[in-house]
Image (cartoon, grey):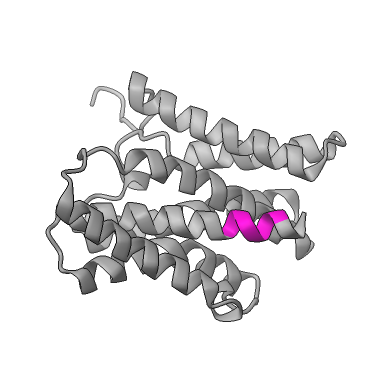
Amino acid sequence: MEELLYWLGLAAVGVSALTGALDAGRKQMDIVGLIMVGLATALGGGTVRDILLDRRPFWLADELNLVVAMSTAALCFVVARRWRLPPRLFLIPDAIGLALFTVVGTQIALQYSTSWLAASLLGVTTGVVGGVLRDVLCNEVPLLFMRGELYATAAWIGALTLLALQALGVSPVLAAWVAMGVIIALRGLAVIYKIRVPIFREKGG
C-alpha cells in the first residue's frame, strides 16, 4: 500500500499542476506565473494536511514532487502555445486530482492514528485546498465555494467510502480504487447533469 500511495501522490501532483497551468493559461499568464500557479495547486492541499499532522511537508521530504509539478506546468505551457485547448478541459484532470489527493490524504491521516472523521476531513482538505489556491490566484471564485457545487461533498463521500470499505475488510488497494471512482463519477455527474447540494435560503427569500 505504501508504494501505491507514493505513486498515486505523484500522479495527483502532476494532474493538479496541469489544472493549475490550464487555468493560469486562460488568464494569459507568462511561464513564471503559470508554473507558480501549478505549484500552488499541486502542493497546497498536501502541505496543509502535513502541517496539521505535524509532519514534514511531502514535497520537502521528496523533491521529485517539485520536479513533477514544475515540469508538468512547463509542458502545458509549451503545448498550449501550439494547440488551442478547450476551455473546460481542466475539469477532467481536476476531478482526477481531487480523487487522487483525497484518497492519499485520507490514507496518510489514518497512518497517524487519527479518527475516521478526522481522516476523512483531512482527505477532503488534501483534495480541495490546492484548487482553492489555484482559483484565488487566477482571480476566480473557487469551485469549492460555488453555489451548491458538488465538489468538497464528492471528496467527502469518496473518503467515507474508502473508510467504510476498509472497515468491512476490503483491501486498502481495492478500497482506494473504488473511492477514487466514486469521486470522479460524482464530479462528472455533477458537471453533466448540474447536480447541486442544497443551499442556505431564508424562508420567503
Q: Residue at x 35, y 33 (%)?
A: 148
In the image, residue 13 above or below residue 57 = above
Give the quarter of the figure containing the C terminus. top left
Horizontal side of residue 183 vs 178, given as left or right: left
Residue 152 is a magenta residue: no
Q: Residue at x 58, y 31 (%)?
A: 182
Q: Residue at x 66, y 33 (%)?
A: 178
Residue 83 place in picture, x, y as percent: 18, 46
Residue 187 sits in quarter: top left
Residue 172 place in picture, x, y as percent: 78, 44
Question: For this rendering, which residue is in front, 165 or 83?
Answer: 83
Q: Residue at x 77, y 54 (%)?
A: 1
Horizontal side of residue 163 vs 86, given as left or right: right
In the image, residue 29 above or below residue 79 = below
Question: For this rendering, which residue is in front, 110 or 60?
Answer: 60
Residue 3 place in picture, x, y as percent: 73, 59
Horizontal side of residue 123 vs 167, given as left or right: left
Extreme residue in the left direction: 28
Whether residue 88 is visible here, answered yes or no, is yes
Extreme residue in the right direction: 169
The boundaries of the magenta stretch are: 4-9
Residue 150 place in picture, x, y as percent: 42, 34
